[in-house]
Amino acid sequence: MNIEGFLTKRMIWAVNALGLILVYLGFLMWLAGIRDAAVIGFERFLVFTGGFLGAAASVTGALGSKKTTDTQNLGLFVWAGFFLLIALFAVVLLI
């Protein structure tokens, strides 16, 4: 199966949801208030991984999917930028 076969709307949505869950878990761990260096490092890892995963899925879906329209591609690009902004905001909070 080629890569375009994996770029369905459902797969793009699922990977974006997974990225949001990772960012959210990192933020929840920050709210717990544990200030150990290892925990802060794990929080940053979750936020960076989730942010990159979601943004990469959105950009890949916008550029490579043949099943999305131009309006959906624009929305995916905007969502990728918003996703990176969320991840950046969460990382700034983790400092």
Image (tube, grey):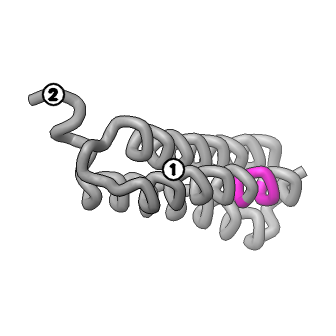
Q: Secondary structure at mark 1?
A: helix
Q: Which residue is mark 2?
A: 2
**Percent position of residue 70, x then y:** 42, 54
**Percent position of residue 50, x then y:** 56, 49
Q: Secondary structure at mark 2?
A: loop
Q: Which residue is mark 1?
A: 54
**Percent position of residue 82, x then y:** 67, 59
Residue in view at x 34 percent, y 59 percent = 14
* Majority SS type along the magenta span: helix
Residue 46 shown left or right of residue 7 in the figure? right
The disc, 2 or 1, on the residue closer to the chain's N-terminal end is 2
Q: Amino acid at mark 2?
A: Asn
Residue in view at x 21 percent, y 41 percent = 6
Q: Quadrant of the N terminus?
A: top left
Residue 65 vs 35, above or below: the answer is: above
Q: Which mark is residue 70?
A: none
Viewer-side residue, 21 vs 5? 5
Q: Label 2 to label 1, Cα distance in Å? A: 21 Å
Q: Quadrant of residue 23?
A: bottom right
Residue 57 shown left or right of residue 93 in the figure? left
Residues shaded magenta: 86-90
**Identity of the residue furthest to the top in this view:** 2
**Identity of the residue furthest to the left in this view:** 1
